[in-house]
Amino acid sequence: MKLISLILITLFSIATLQDSKLNLICQKWRLFGLKECDKANSLIRESRASTLVINRDGTYERNIPDMYRTKGEWHFNSDSSKLMFMILERQGKGMEPRSLEPKFDSIVKLTRDTLIYCSSNFNYKQKKLEYTNWYFVKEQ
């Protein structure tokens, strides 16, 4: 009986944590900076600051004013420590989802007003993995 209670409490705790992260992440974010690999931090000019809208229904939209717009689906990994973005539409044109293994971005920080995540890409020319940290603040 104690084992069943412990399992139920653990499952409830995990579900509560995931719901809590869902409540934190589902909002409109504004990119204010990024850090690529070994380069210095880069601030984003306000006129080119992209927005990222993450919705509870598993959809998202990323927009750089007058330049670039994507829409797609997102989700957490099993322990809600990473994000995956799948682009389904670019510049208003539909795209086929890729059949590659999904790529998850690590959540570095997630609070009521801050989202920082780290994405990785393989640089084939230099034959190494490169990282970019994306810094967002909650859009008011």
Image (cartoon, rainbow, N blue to C red):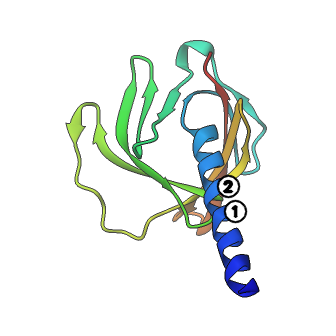
x%, y% of residue 2? 76, 84
Residue 77: give x, y in percent of width and height: 55, 63
Question: In the figure, is residue 127 to the left or right of 42?
Answer: left
User: Mark 2: which amino acid?
Assistant: Leu
Quarter-wise, where is residue 13 in the image? bottom right
Q: Which residue is mark 2?
A: 17
* Quarter of the picture holding the C terminus: top right
The residue positioned 70% from the left and 69% from the top of the image is: 9
Residue at the location (28% across, 31% down)? 91
Give SS at disc 2. helix
In percent of the image, x 63 and y 17: which residue is there?
Answer: 45
Q: Is residue 101 above or below residue 136?
A: below
Single out the residue that lies furthest toward the top.
47
Image coordinates of residue 121 in percent, x first then y, are: 55, 59
Foreground pick, 140 / 70: 140
Q: Quadrant of residue 96?
A: bottom left
Q: In what quadrant of the picture does the N terminus appear?
A: bottom right
**82 lies left or right of 84:** right
Tag 1–tag 2 contact (CB < 8 Å): yes
**Do we see residue 78 in this rendering?**
yes
Look at the numbered disc 1 and give the secondary structure of its residue.
Answer: helix
Q: Position of residue 6 (x, y in %)?
A: 73, 78
Find residue 1 and name its label.
none
Query: Relative to residue 2, is residue 130 drawn left or right?
Result: left
On residue 13, which mark appears?
1
CA gap between label 1 and label 2 equals: 6 Å
Residue at left offset 51%, top offset 65%: 124
Residue 7's place in the image compared with 69, above or below, is below
Q: Amino acid at mark 1?
A: Ser
Question: How many residues crowd around disc 2 within 10 Å: few (fewer than 14), some, or many (20 or more)?
Answer: some
